[in-house]
Amino acid sequence: MFNIFRKELNWGGKKLTLETGRIARQADGAVLATYGDTVVLCTVSAAKQVKPEQDFFPLTVHYQEKSFAVGRIPGGFFKREGRPSEREVLVSRLIDRPIRPLFPEKFFNEVQVICTVLSHDLENDPDLVSMIGASAALTISGIPFLGPIAAARVGYIGGQLVLNPGLSQMSKSDLDLVVAGTEEGVLMVESEAKELTEEVMLEAVMFGHRHFQPVIQAIIELAEQCAKDPWELPITSSELTFMTDQFYQKYHQRIRDCYKIANKQQRYAALDALKAEITASVEQTKQQQASTIFKELEYKIVRQSVLETGRRIDGRDTVTIRPIVSETNFLSKGHGSALFTRGETQALVVATLGTGEDEQIVDALQGEYRENFMLHYNFPPYSVNEVGRLGSPGRREIGHGKLAWRAIHPLLPAKEAFPYTIRVVSEITESNGSSSMATVCGTSLALMDAGVPLPRPVAGIAMGLIKEQEKFVVLSDILGDEDHLGDMDFKVAGTSHGVTALQMDIKITSITSEIMRTALQQAAKGRLHILAEMAKTLPISRPAVSEKAPRITVISVPKDKIREIIGTGGKVIREICEVTKAKIDIDDDGTVKVAAVDAVSSQAAINWIRGIISEPEIGTIYTGKVVKIMDFGAFVNFLGSRDGLVHVSEMASQRIKQPSDVVAVGDTVRVKVLGVDDRGKIKLSMKNIDQKIDPASENLKMTV
């Protein structure tokens, strides 16, 4: 019944298996990819017809994780997988980016790639398996695809590069880098690093490229056994070629003149007017073709101009960075804020500090965990002078936000040293190239403005590439048009000490190590320039946390006292929070975090907790609360749940008739421990003690 084809190889010390012919046989291509005990089903389907007047390639990639892959039932009210998680969106983008450039230029059939995680061994990440499986499924499908590609993960542990480190090894690694490409070169890089040098980053990229070559050969050998007949490639008509030549002769100089306009909005207005003139000059049935030709002429003319003159759209040379203006403390109520402007790109970034209650709970395949650093990137339509729908964040916003998160994350202080939850929001208010790198710069400034102790500021820069045959030029700090019309989007973030994040997307079939080395060296110079400009505004973190942020104090208590602090049903800790207005987080190891808006509230809560865990000392004065009055004296609650008796003879220096003449139930009083009687009861005294209550005094039980 099944005609199964399988290819196996030992890769990185583990077995990689690619199998087809048993599952999803009606798809154009389907591969069951297994690495270790992680299994992903990768399928490819393509529309057989192109929609009328369609002039773009509609590729969609969906990566989906199933809870059954780790033997779990989804949490929450609805017991089935719902909308894609942030991780699923990020991995979908990771698969999409290296395969998209490898479809033929005029191929407009809709293609859908779906990668479903069926089993996860909690050691080998499914993202890598999905990329390889998707490449194999495309290669055997017959759909026009200039692959195959492969991918590898590279770690840096103990000064050595490691191929495909498992999840258990990643905590020791100074690098998490995923590289994908073809046999000829690299197409995509995604990474987070702990201030590594450009040389190490380049070495890691090429290390991954060398080591995934056996996977490419395995996919080719599988395709030789079972690939379907190839589809016919679209052919450009001679009429379209003739129209292109005509338009170039007639309009190329006017297009060049439009691209000499430095201001983005004015340039766009001139180009739109010229495009309207060109499309109006042909009959209606050919206007769509004319619009497509105009885009091709833009692409050709801008690239030619940069290669020939070394001058760019806005008049800069290839290495100059646009003017930078940065401001901090931009918002009066924000804990930390920055407005970072580079040319016509601007990011308003706000940092907010919270407590452990504000941590994000992430329900992942690997299990539930808490995240205390969040970075949210928003790209409203007005930033590019457009009218658009506002809704939940899209794939682009999630991807750009995660890139900025990776750039900043290696510099954040340890949770034990800085017990705050950090949320950063970047609102892109203007955009003309690399708003994600503006977010990195703005985030660094906003965090330092909030008093987050970053050891060094972080900056980012986007590099571009224009390549024609053997000639190429690398562009620093690219514009939006240069990103759109160029061959590479190469983003590097880091400090003066090294790289913290590297993301690269290639729009041609591949690039060489020489181009990458040039881009990294040029990016390093640009990054240092941006850091110098940022230092004019705020060179280092402010010495203390913002006065507008909550104060968090960390103390440690014995584990066996945690239950007493919490109380039955949380009664005690709720009372502490209600009375002192502080927030309290208690970890299982006895770490207690007390957050309050002022020092008095914080100290009151800390003293209350200390009172609960302390043992009464003879001769020491404590503050307590009268809980019961008897004829012979009053019972006072102090040091948590402890009660002691103040005998009527110990209530005042003079003789009194009855305790109610001195105290009432609910009064806050100061008492001294006299000792313990034969029955184990604590004896207290109020004689000769100043009853003035200091809310921040040591061993405080109740506040006034």
Image (cartoon, rainbow, N blue to C red):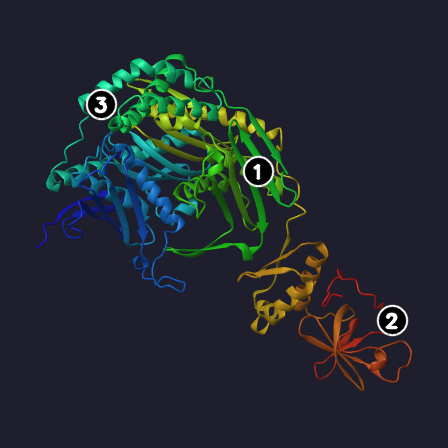
- Image position of 647 with respect to 209: above or below: below
Residue where numbered disc 2 is placed: 688
Q: Quadrant of the C terminus?
A: bottom right
The mark that comes first in sequence, 3 or 1, is: 3
Q: Which of 340 and 17 lies nearest the eye of the viewer?
A: 340
Q: Label 1 amino acid?
A: Pro
Q: Picture quarter containing residue 664?
A: bottom right
- For image coordinates 26% across by 38% down, the residue present is 150
Q: Give the residue at mark 1.
A: 455
How packed mark 2 is, by other alpha carbons closer than 10 Å (few <14, some 14-19, many 20 or more), is few
Can residue 216 be seen in the rendering of this structure?
yes
Query: Could you say whether the residue bearing mark 3 is in a helix, strand or loop?
Result: helix
Q: Which residue is mark 3?
A: 240
Front label number (1 vs 2): 1
Q: Position of residue 96 (x, y in %)?
A: 31, 40
Q: CA distance from mark 3 to mark 2?
A: 104 Å
Frontmost residue, 128 versus 35 = 128
